[in-house]
Image: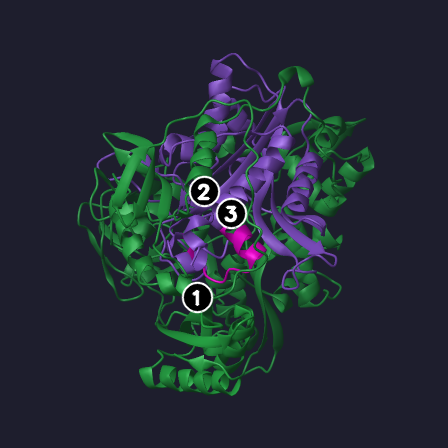
Chain colours: A purple, B green
Amino acid sequence: MAENTTRGHMHPISSFIREANRIFFDMGFAFAEGPLLESEHYNFDALNFEKDHPARDMQDTFFIKDEPGYLLRTHTSPVQVRYMEAQIKKGIQPPYRIVVPGKVFRNEATDMGHEAEFFHIEALAVDTDITLAHLKGTLAQFFSGMFKGTQVEVRFRPSFFPFTEPSVEVDMRITGENAPEKLRDKWMEMGGAGMVHPNVLRNAGVDPEKYQGFAFGFGIDRLAMLRWGIDDVRLMHSADLRFINQF
Amino acid sequence: MKISRNWLGTFFDRSLPEAPALADALTFHAFEIESIENVRLTKSNIEDQILDVKVTPNRGHDCLSHRGIAKELAAILDLRMKPDALREATSLDHATDAVSVSIQRSDLCNRYIAGYMQGVKVGPSPDWLKSTLESIGQRPINNVVDATNFIMFNLGQPLHAFDASKLKIENGKLNIVVRNAKEKEKMVGLDDNEYILAKSMLIIADGNADAAIGIAGVKGGKPAGVSEATKDIIIESANFDGASVRKAAQALKLRTDASFRFEQGLSPELAAYGMHAVAVLIQMLAGGEIVGFADEYPFRTRRVLNPISLTLAKINAVLGTSLKDSDIADAFTRLDLPFKQNGDSFTVTPPFERLDLTIPEDLIEEVARIVGYDKIPTTPLSSLDSARGKPHVNPNFAAAERVREEMMGKGYSEVFTSVFAEKGERVVANKADGTRPYLRSTLVPHLKDAYEKNKHNKDLLGLMDVRIFEIGTVWKGRTEIMMLGTADKSGVKEIPLKPVEADSYEDHPLSTTERYQPFSKYPFIVRDIALWTPQGTEPVEVLDAIRREAGTLLVRSEKFDEFKKGGKTSFAFHLVLQSFEKTLTDAEANAVMEKVNTAVKEKGWEVR
């Protein structure tokens, strides 16, 4: 039994983040992060969520007791505003390119497909000339990197998020011999994306008359489940080596 | 929202494509479709297809109706609609003094129209109306109530009918008041439930009797409800503040088709179209005479939506396209958005119900989805100016990556455990499942649990001992910090993760696993076997023979001992047996071992 003298195993989410960060780093995206216990300001207000609007219902939020205005972030998007704000404070104008992998929370009952805590990966690119076509191009490059040796197609469908306009849902399809059989030739939902809403740029101190950008946010757990054929999202936080030691 | 294909058909002269084609059109140009259902209504034997359309929150203003979805389809498929009810002039100039309306909270009620009708004959609705409502899962009640529901699902304006004879007349007048509820004011709803209201809630009251007859935008009251005996009615077509309706509906746990629509924020202009349409329909179905309308509309003049200007260049600059001005004009025309074009410049004046259109980007989205997102090219980002150098390396991530490698090098595997704990310094106020509401202030307890749990599986995992680590967030001393925790046979420890300043990330390996294999959740049994073999026998030869015989119950087998004596070699193997279907019994494990023993003996090997 020589197992323990050999290498331990990396959590599949960590492997995914390592690989995604590498792809984005090569495209000029810096790894950025923000707090998990976030303010309502960054999680909602600065992202153009109107108060008392049904859009806030889309996110079932954990609020912190006796700390009004604080919550567990429901997405990685607050980091968009935090990052841009910090750059402006340092006197650095766009171009900005960041990738934000990290933990997020939804206050819901857990089952095979849903977890209260899971991981998102967000990216933001802001410059004078960033377009929706660049979003498609960046996603194609990202997915091609994550599903190497396959042909990747990216498809948009209309959607709504308060912090992007236009907003789209992103679907991906992989084809070719190297595509895992279970995934081959099927459109898969990846997550939301769009062009950064001018109000979000303005809220972060960036001039929306001069700059524009794209952003997307996808669930990593779901992508990892697709990638490795994992059938139960709860395995991710199970700390069960019967699962982890397979990676 | 349920949308009937037959119902949609009433908005067009020509027949519509089949439901799957409509679903596709909506999916790629407007809204997600949750399901398509084929229905046959039992009484009428009418066949229909029902689309469950997930209208996005920005389009709740104008698309929560068959008219709204028909309008979308007309734009997407470039179909000609019959004249649009919301584009025709409506007149409610048949004013009446028999009803007075007073709005005490004009900030929460932008408009209230009371339509007074006398001499209606309440009775069952005609078959077409019954089956139309049934097709979208609504229960027909009577012709007056059904008419109000039909117009709501048709045009999007919630409506309500009161029995006017149940309201008090003073000085020859009915008096409708829109006011806040009194503290603990009670009202029995049409659903026979008694609701205890709060001061913050807006209600409709019979002003002469000072009694609540409806919770604004949410539910009508039982006392003034329409019954078979009703002859005179007051129809309400009003506009209530979305946030106020939403709060009341939430507090009363009473989400209705009306409250759902008001929550989105509706145009007060719509109220007039709703009133006009329902009055005409009720007259058709139940006869009676329209006495007149009392239209209280405090800020009428503010209601025009601002024109939005944008250029072709701006549209292409956001979308990354090379659309022509004719493409833009075509999209606006199909969407029925009034616009003026001056060369490459466009000025759109949104129709009253399109409250979602306020900035140029909103119109760019309209163009994009009508043109089609498949027309957006795939353009790689250009390389960043080399003067800016490579992206900044995140010190926390660099540290986590380095530590991860170190730990794995020492045989530790990485786990993630929950941030929710039994104890901690900060606590979640509204945890859905009610358990472990605290945010952890240490990684230790969960890591200890994980260690204990995995320890039982070490034979199954083929480990001498269990070693795990976690890089995770804790909340301690009012700050959020990243910790490295480890658990092994010597105990559980944690230390803060120290940031690492670097110019680039180290080139660490990735997981090479192709596919995850589901594992059995049942307990396993370990059996050892030791045997003598002639010198020169390879262990793999023996293992192969064992594996062949043990079959699928053998989930792990490995050699743990080997020595030579007297020209023979002794091998010893761990065999881990486990079933995917059930807990394996000792007897079943013994049976497997007997088969294995027999097989190896046949090979001439001697079991020790």
Which of the 4 image quadrants contains residue A35? Answer: top left
Q: Using the image, name the chain to which the residue with label 2 belongs.
A: B
Q: Which residues are magenta?
A: A219-236
Q: Amino acid at mark 2?
A: Gly
Residue B257 seen from this side: no
Does B122 sit above or below residue B508?
below
Residue lying at the far front in this picture: please name it: B566
Give the labeled residue for mark 2: B409
Q: Residue B192 appears at what percent x and percent y? A: 27, 66
Which of the 4 image quadrants contains residue B16? Answer: bottom right
Residue lying at the far top in this picture: please name it: A91
Give the labeled residue for mark 1: B563
Residue located at (47% from left, 22% from top): B501
Q: Amino acid at mark 3?
A: Ile
Residue located at (77% from left, 37% from top): B329
Is A224 covered by the magenta stretch?
A: yes
- Kindly indicate whether the residues beneath marks 1 and 2 are on one polypeptide chain: yes
Q: Residue A125 appears at what percent x and percent y? A: 60, 29
Q: Earlier in the sequence, mark 1 or mark 2?
A: 2
Q: Nearest the camera: B171 or B511?
A: B511
Q: Nearest the camera: B520 or B561?
A: B561
Mark 1 to mark 2: distance in Å? 30 Å
| Label placed on residue B485 | none
The kind of secondary structure element at disc 1 is strand
Give the labeled residue for mark 3: A220
Foreground: disc 2 or disc 3: 2
Mark 2 to mark 3: distance in Å? 25 Å
Which of the 4 image quadrants contains residue B385? Answer: top right
